Image (tube, rainbow, N blue to C red):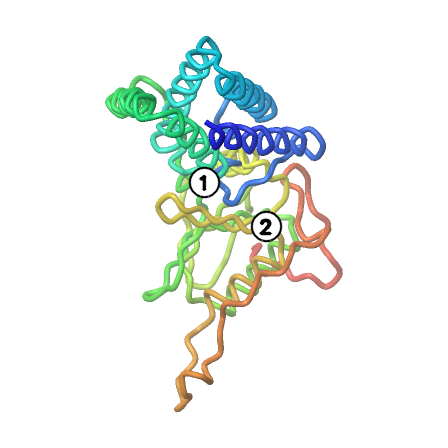
């Protein structure tokens, strides 16, 4: 039980720090974009989620401490609470897989702590937890969550033009604005590094858009792109978005996107007898976005002096 007590304390620390960060700076810590996406799809503020988690782990720590002193009442109550925690985590895991379709790394850490806490209460507790967790997952996966509901519109319906070379390294969405000088700079960089397939998704209506080799898409809806960025908590463009299965990449700001394009979309260089030790590595880190490196999605962005608008006709 002593290990279970320390696991509960770790849970208190994680959820408490996360709640404090959300309260102070409006956003907690996560190791991938999944947290932001999951948060955007829930009705409860992440602050309250983490406060509830803090109280949960605090009660578990108290219960385990009292159970070690011989209190059977606290032991039964703590066991029941941990089983309830497993059931709740099963619901959240099903939500991530079926609804948001991306996994939240922070959520998985909390799930792991609750699983471990149940394990250290004995084999009987582990068996009960496994049965409850499995039952909730089975029921969740047997339900049609989209039946009778209006499904969210895919980003493809917000694409105004699509560029796809015969051979390409990456495929991604590029969110831009017709009045954004930073977006024009990114488009220029992309034109010089054409080995990626790109869907151009504007947050406003372009009078006309021109990019070498890109095919226009009729009937695009900028509102879809604007809504998507707002759900991500993003207020500026340009933004590059890539999704591969449950892995999502969001890159914001002119310099970071241009660095990514230069790294991932550059034309292949001819190999002129270089030894493997002499190969140039393209795995350099992306620069940290700087201030004034993007344009607001809510208002026009003033063009910088000398900035070309060749993609507007």
Seen at 51% across and 28% down, the residue is: 5
Judged from the image, the secondary structure of the residue bearing numbered disc 1 is helix
Question: Label 1: how many residues lie within 10 Å, few (<14), some (14-19) or many (20+)?
Answer: many
| Marked residue nearer the N-terminal end (2 or 1) | 1
Camera sees residue 145: no
Query: Looking at the image, which is closer to me, 182 or 49?
Result: 49
Q: CA distance from mark 2 to mark 1?
A: 19 Å
Judged from the image, the secondary structure of the residue bearing numbered disc 2 is strand
Query: Looking at the image, which is closer to me, 60 or 208?
Result: 60
Question: Label 2: how many residues lie within 10 Å, few (<14), some (14-19) or many (20+)?
Answer: many
Q: Position of residue 54 (x, y in %)?
A: 58, 24
Q: Position of residue 223 (x, y in %)?
A: 52, 34
Q: Quadrant of the N terminus?
A: top left
Q: Which residue is mark 2?
A: 252
Q: Position of residue 256 (x, y in %)?
A: 60, 58
Camera sees residue 110: yes
Q: Nearer the viewer, mark 2 or mark 1?
A: 2
Q: Which residue is mark 1?
A: 158
Seen at 56% across and 30% down, the residue is: 9
Q: Residue furthest right?
A: 305
Seen at 33% across and 66% down, the residue is: 167
């Amino acid at each position: 039980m002593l290990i279970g007590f320390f696991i509960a304390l770790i849970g208190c620390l994680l959820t408490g720090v996360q709640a404090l960060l959300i309260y102070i700076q409006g956003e907690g810590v996560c190791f991938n974009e999944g947290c932001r996406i999951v948060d955007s799809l829930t009705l409860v503020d992440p602050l309250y989620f983490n406060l509830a988690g803090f109280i949960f782990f605090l009660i578990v720590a108290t219960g385990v401490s009292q159970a070690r002193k011989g209190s059977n009442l606290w032991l039964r109550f703590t066991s029941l609470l941990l089983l309830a925690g497993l059931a709740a985590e099963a619901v959240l895991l099903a939500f991530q897989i079926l609804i948001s379709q991306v996994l939240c790394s922070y959520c998985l850490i909390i799930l792991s702590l609750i699983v471990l806490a149940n394990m250290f209460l004995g084999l009987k507790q582990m068996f009960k937890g496994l049965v409850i967790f499995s039952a909730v997952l089975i029921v969740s996966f047997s339900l049609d969550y989209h039946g009778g509901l209006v499904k969210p519109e895919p980003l493809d319906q917000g694409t105004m033009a699509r560029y796809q070379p015969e051979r390409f390294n990456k495929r991604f969405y590029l969110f831009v604005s017709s009045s954004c000088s930073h977006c024009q700079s990114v488009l220029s960089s992309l034109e010089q590094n054409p080995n990626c397939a790109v869907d151009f998704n504007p947050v406003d209506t372009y009078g006309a858009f021109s990019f070498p080799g890109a095919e226009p898409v009729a009937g695009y809806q900028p509102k879809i792109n604007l809504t998507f960025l707002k759900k991500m908590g993003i207020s500026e463009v340009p933004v590059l978005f890539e999704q591969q299965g449950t892995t999502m990449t969001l890159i914001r700001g002119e310099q970071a996107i241009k660095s990514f394009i230069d790294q991932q979309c550059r034309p292949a260089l001819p190999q002129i007898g270089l030894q493997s030790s002499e190969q140039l590595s393209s795995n350099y880190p992306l620069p940290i976005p700087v201030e004034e490196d993007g344009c607001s999605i809510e208002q026009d962005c003033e063009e910088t002096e000398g900035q070309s608008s060749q993609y507007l006709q």
